[in-house]
Image (cartoon, grey):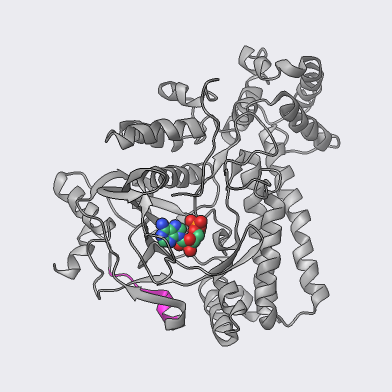
Amino acid sequence: MDARTQWEVGLALPRQPMRALGPEFYTELIPQGLPQPSLRLVSVDAARLLGLHAPCDAVARAEWAEVFAGNRSGPDGTTLATVYAGHQFGNWAGQLGDGRAHLLGSFAAPDATQNSGHDAWEVQLKGSGRTPYSRFGDGRAVLRSSLREFLCSEAMWHLGIPTTRALCLVDSPLAVQRERVERAAIVTRLAPSFVRVGHFEHFAHSGQHDSLRRLLHWWIEHFEPDCAAADDPALALMQRVVQRSAELVAAWQAVGFVHGVLNTDNLSMLGWTLDYGPFGFVDAFDPDYTPNTSDRDGRYSWRNQPAAVHWNLHALAAALRPLLHADATSVRAVLDSFGDRFEHAWRRRIAARLGLSRTRPGDDELARGWIELLRRARADWTLSFRLLGQTVDGAVPHALRAQFAACEPEFDSWLQRWRARQRAGGDGRAAMDRVNPRIVLRHHLAQDAIAAAERGDFAPAQNLLDALRAPFADTPAHAALAAPPPADAPPAALSCSS
Ligand code: AMP
Ligand code: MG
């Protein structure tokens, strides 16, 4: 097969920026690909980021299916799998790496403003076969988890939360053994970079300090050129990563997103959400919520996410230690700044969600009171904020009152204070509706879409994607997707199996 046909989907020739680092950072290899691939979903928004038009006829769809199943090698026959390591659930796990992901390369971003100022997108296949880093894994991803990653990437982006993107989803009759036999699939992901904390840890923990230094300089050159001129570039980088990670986890907390596996190998250096596995959105609010059934101690529960990210940043600082000029006290000060940065970002987000972005004394207490009420009443996180916006200039909706049935007098008294505060200079309903999503990727919605997809029907997934692209809109056709899970829906309980 002519290798050049990969690029008939419209992509320009890619670069592989990581090649500049040297072969200890990756393995060049051809993806195993998927037999008889079908293109099931395309994110037209993500396609636009690469300057691509979503395919609109059968020929173009077949071409996309082949390319994004990994069945066409690149122009020079090579894609890359990179090596990293990580701490998993607090324990050193040693060498890991792209065990089922292949970097197709880096492609120009026609509009860098859509890419946090970065001028290129890395394009990566996930589920495209074994690599030297697969350990005991089969290199595959199943349709169920690929569809969840596809939908959630796009949902998060449209919620305004930094995240890797999903270009398209391809599946195949290839049978993959998990708890049951499932269909294989590949999600094509986009990010300015997929480099994780674990990439730095790998070279630090294996004593390859020259390579560690090269990685640092390469990273700074490509992604943080401002740090190059700092007295202590590694410390300047730490400051950036601490700030971005604090903002990211505050955004997760505020929208009720629980990542589920916040290991250092899943924490992006860019502060973007990365590696969607057993994630979930909080429905009835319980701070100890985690969707991941393997996480019995709740290490990565909603409540513990900020501490988990902070822990990972300590691991990054430890990895960078050989390159830091600063003494331990200065490094600690940077790490300690995480707490204030997180608090600041969290307060700002919750204040906006409560229509209190022009803050006044007493607002923090009001916000704390609301979160405590949500917890005591086990009220639905997403719905409660959204309905609260409607009470600014209207009666209290019955659906909101119902959420707080378990502590009605306290709710009434809180509401009275909040309404008084709104009259004294709140943001108003329209502003609240712009920050309080109506629709998030609730577990039961994902499950319904998966059940249909596994029968070969992708219409519900497409419909859900359409709704998640406009999470703040009041589109009547999507009303059913805004409802909390039905009482008889099984709770979100996901294993790491994917
Ligand atoms: P995750 O828990 O998905 O973040 O993955 C942790 C590590 O296991 C990474 O190095 C992955 O590449 C690898 N991995 C996960 N699933 C598979 C699989 N089915 N085949 C090969 N490697 C895998
Ligand atoms: Mg991972």
Q: Residue furthest bottom?
A: 210
Residue 91 coordinates in the image, percent (x, y) = 65, 63
Q: Residue at x 80, y 30 (%)?
A: 369
User: Where is residue 269, by image quadrant?
Assistant: bottom right
Of the 4 image quadrants, the one containing the N terminus is bottom left
Q: Which is more toward the observer, 104 or 220?
A: 104
Q: Position of residue 422 (x, y in %)?
A: 75, 26
Say above or below: 17 vs 194.
below
Q: Which residues are magenta?
A: 13-20
Q: Is residue 113 visible?
A: no
Residue 340 in the magenta stretch? The answer is no
Residue ID at (47%, 43%): 152
Q: Residue placed at 58% from the left, 58% from the top?
A: 271
User: Would residue 165 be seen by someone viewing this image from the given angle?
Assistant: yes
Q: Classify residue 130 as left or right of residue 491.
A: left
Q: Which is more toward the observer, 41 or 208?
A: 208
Could you tell me residue 210's position as x and y percent? 57, 87
